[in-house]
Image: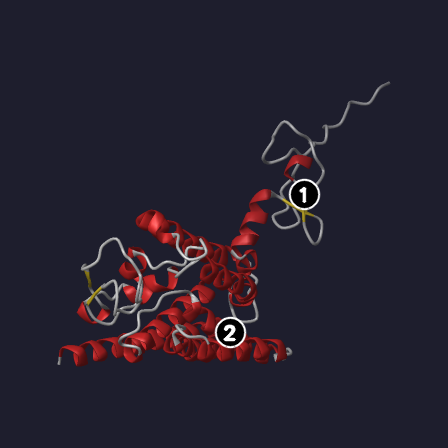
Amino acid sequence: MTEPAGPSATVPVCFRHPSRETYVRCARCERPICPDCMRVAAVGHQCPECVAEGRRTQRPVRTAFGGSQVGREGYVTKALIALNVLGVVIGAAVAGSAAVVGNGLFTGVTKWQWLGGVISRSSTVTASGGWFPGQVLPDLGTVYTGVADGAYYRLITAMFIHYGLIHLLANMWALWILGRTLEGVLGPLRFLALYLIAGIGGNVAVFLIDQLQPAAGASTALFGLFAAFFLVLRRLGRDTSAVIGLLVVNLVLTFAVPGISIAGHLGGLVTGALVGAIMAYAPRERRRLVQWGGSGAVFVLLVLLTVAATASYSG
């Protein structure tokens, strides 16, 4: 005599693939999952939905100064270098063969530098007796509007224009070395704010002090990066001797080499030190507020100084 068969046990199937049998369950939601849906977790496996939910609720990893880890890739540094190179390319295109003078290293002063460099007041380019005696420019007699006459864009564009290939290469090498390190520890947004505010600060100093000397180049921002790098290393308890040595050498060159904008370099240095101190020493519990609020305050101060200087020119 045979006994009647009992009810067959139901085999669980994957909740995402009902045709696949499985005995593995998600460690979080306990729903059955097949091998294609398994995601290795700290304990057991999880389904794709629980993994995605965990990523949304998980706090992103930040640097010691609150920045994003994306800064380690150096995207902002690379973009800044590309913009500076583009400035030289445009300058050569605007000036044509007139840009290739001296040793053939793009050492000429072109219309592009006059259009984008720091000039305090409206100025007329002359072939002799001007700021660049003996330079032959293709558009003599053109009046270029200065910052005091409303060309405020010069305080920004001057950071991306250079007076030659050697000038560009020296600055871009420094930016590559300093930029990647600072962007990695500060994060891309904080690093970009530091670079731009320091560069503008140096150009504002040129506008305030060197009223008869045009200026251009990334050096204003780079001196700010030097100051900020020193403060960041001090905050992290690292050795600062190498940075001090490089900074001293660059300061000596600033005062010793004719034609270098002393006001621009020192202005960038002081501005970078202010923003760098804010970024490095902001209290952890209010770090974002202090960093962005303090950096914004420095920028507003630069705006006020520019407005006051403009008023004095017209007064």
| Nearer to the camera, 50 or 313 | 313
Residue bearing the label numbered 1: 25
| Nearer to the camera, 100 or 313 | 100
Quadrant of the rendered structure where residue 61 is? bottom right
| Nearer to the camera, 50 or 247 | 247
* CB atoms of marks 2 and 1 within 8 Å: no
Residue 35 appears anywhere in the view: yes
Figure colour scheme: secondary structure
Instruction: List x then y, in percent, for residue 11.
Output: 70, 32
Tell which tag, 2 or 1, sits nearer the viewer: 2
Instruction: List x then y, in percent, for residue 153.
Output: 27, 63
Residue depicted at x 66% and y 41%: 38
Q: Residue furthest top?
A: 1
Q: How many marks?
A: 2
* Left or right relative to 225: residue 127: left
Residue 68 appears anywhere in the view: no
The amino acid type found where label 1 is placed reads Arg
Examine the rendered structure and indicate whether residue 271 appears above or below residue 103.
below
Query: Sequence order check: which comes first, mark 2 or mark 1?
Result: 1
Residue depicted at x 86% and y 18%: 1
Residue bearing the label numbered 2: 226
Disc 2, SS:
helix
Disc 1, SS:
loop
Quadrant of the rendered structure where residue 312 is? bottom left
Q: Residue furthest left?
A: 315
Q: Real-space Cα distance between discs 2 and 1? A: 55 Å
Instruction: List x then y, in percent, for residue 91.
Output: 35, 52
Mark 1: few/some/many CA within 10 Å (<14, 14-19, 20+): many
Instruction: List x then y, in percent, for residue 217.
Output: 40, 65
* Left or right relative to 61: residue 139: left
Residue depicted at x 36% and y 53%: 99
The amino acid type found where label 2 is placed reads Phe
